[in-house]
Amino acid sequence: MRSALFVASLPEAVAWSKFLGFVDGKLQPHAKSIVRIGENVWLLDVASNPAPLAWLVTTAEHHGIRYGILPFDGEPQWLPAGFDPNTI
């Protein structure tokens, strides 16, 4: 697995804010290997740094938030006609 898409279900607002509060602090030092695509979606470069995926999974488990992981064998490649989320 080279990269992965982590998608968390959106629970009630209180649980989500606690989840984000903990996750944001843990993921900040690893910002170069993470792209947050949406409110509840992260694209992770697992090959260079697996720690963010581990933090997301353990924090979701701790807060009872359901999640899914979509693994990719290759590096994310954005179509030229679209946009690169790293530049937003």
Image: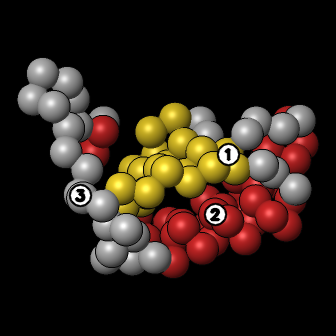
Local SS, label 2: helix
Local SS, label 1: strand
**Cβ atoms under marks 2 and 1 closer than 8 Å:** yes
Which comes sooner in the sequence, label 2 or label 1? 1
Q: What residue lies at 30% left-to-right and 61% top-to-bottom? A: 73
Question: Residue 75: which numbered mark, if any?
Answer: 3
Residue kind at label 1, given as amino acid type: Ala
Q: Is residue 32 visible?
A: no
Residue position for label 2? 56
Q: Is residue 13 visible?
A: yes
Residue 18 is drawn in which quadrant? bottom right
Local SS, label 3: loop
Question: Residue 53: which numbered mark, if any?
Answer: none
Q: Position of residue 79 (x, y in %)?
A: 16, 31
Crowding near the residue tagged with mark 3, few <14, some 14–19, many ≥20 C-alpha atoms within 10 Å? some
Residue kind at label 2, given as amino acid type: Leu
Residue position for label 1? 8
Residue closest to the eye, 20 or 80: 80
Q: What residue lies at 21% left-to-right and 29% top-to-bottom? A: 83
Q: Position of residue 22 (x, y in %)?
A: 72, 64
| Cα gap from disc 3 to disc 1, whole angstroms | 21 Å
Q: What residue lies at 67% left-to-right and 65% top-to-bottom? A: 57
| Cα gap from disc 2 to disc 3, whole angstroms | 20 Å
Residue closest to the eye, 17 or 60: 60
Which comes sooner in the sequence, label 3 or label 1? 1
